[in-house]
Image: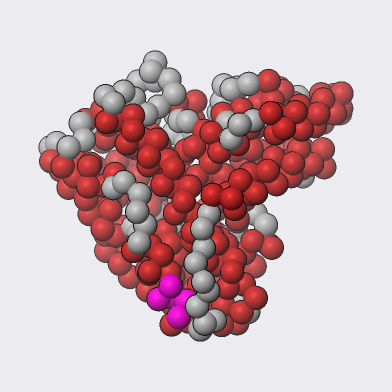
Amino acid sequence: MKQPSPRGELSALVLSVLAGSRGSGQDALARLDLLAVEAISRTPDILLDDDLQLTLFCLYELHYSGIDEAGDDWEWDPDLLRVRHRIEAAFEQRVRDETVVGPPPEPTSAAVCAELFRMTGEDGGPSMSRFVAKSATDDQLRELLVHRSISQLREADPHTFAIPRLSGRSKAALVEIQADEYGNGLLARMHSVLFARTMRGVGLDDTYGAYLDAVPAITLAVNNLMSLFGLHRRLRGAIVGHLAAYEMTSSQPNRLYSRGFGRLGYGSEVTEYFDEHVEADAVHEQIAGRDMAGGLVESDPRLLGDVLFGAAAGLAIDTLMTVHIMDAWESNRSSLRTAEVAV
């Protein structure tokens, strides 16, 4: 990923550190830790803080494809990990404050699956997919793709971190879901490749991270939440719950997204990504709820609360992003940060 533009003193320093060598940046690393403490203490809301969310995103990106000019040896640098821990601890606490989880069901596969369907069915946020199907303009459809490109161009990767942390029935179910996400071994069928094709079809740059500078903090927060859950073994239940909720709320919205793009004259080269998810996620939702999430809880009932938290947190933070986008569109303004970005 190309190096993004900084959004404040903290992200500017971390990007400067990453562009240098480990041996030459000790003074900057010490200052970075102090800046992180100060930024966390003064932010009114870390979910909406561009500087902190971009910093966390970049530190997480070291565990994915990396950042141009950042050496691979930064990935496990203890000073950077200390800074990351400070930010993600505040981020996790804010997410927990935002998340409401109801009374837990019995720790059985059927009961967990039923509770997850209840949670996803009662999500009361605004429906962006219905708006897209009926009313969205061409520019708004492109903005939607820009927001989603941050996750969809590496689709499945955060959840894949959970595979070695699971065993038995839940692991087999996760592998089955992820195999579909990665095209069952066929490059052309990988969901990230299909999404890139959609972006090209509407005239957007399909390079991963091309629009990172354009998206607001809440879009980064949606992505950082997946990395937080995926990269911590103690949160393996949360990443499973997050994926289950994602699969359970995907099929019908993608049907409506496809309808919206078709309404404006786009063909299968653009809509195929959404059409693929209508069919695939209708199957995945049962596997995710009953076998992956339910199977995990049956094998380790202690993880029930984490599974429900992960599902609820994903729904809650995604709703905040949806509200941000819909509020902007209803006010006839862009939901992106930078008007100069060509979309």
- Residue at the image point whose x is 35% and y is 20% from the top: 342
Percent position (x, y) of residue 276? Answer: 28, 57
Verify whether residue 247 appears in magenta: no
Q: How is the image coloured?
A: secondary structure
- Residue at the image point whose x is 76% and y is 32% from the top: 37
Q: Nearer the viewer, residue 181 or 217?
A: 217
| Position of residue 121 in the picture relative to residue 321 (left or right) | left
Percent position (x, y) of residue 71? Answer: 72, 34
Percent position (x, y) of residue 267? Answer: 16, 42
Q: Quadrant of the N terminus?
A: top right
- Residue at the image point whose x is 54% and y is 81% from the top: 107
Q: Quadrant of residue 35?
A: top right
Q: Nearer the viewer, residue 238 or 164?
A: 238
Where are the magenta residues, as a range?
111-115
| Position of residue 165 in the picture relative to residue 278 (left or right) | right
- Residue at the image point whose x is 56% and y is 77% from the top: 297
Q: Quadrant of residue 144?
A: top left
Percent position (x, y) of residue 114? Answer: 40, 76
Q: Quadrant of the C terminus?
A: top left
Q: Is residue 102 visible?
A: yes
Q: Nearer the viewer, residue 210 or 89?
A: 89
| Position of residue 261 in the picture relative to residue 190 (left or right) | left
* Placement of 42 over or under 301, stated as above or below: above
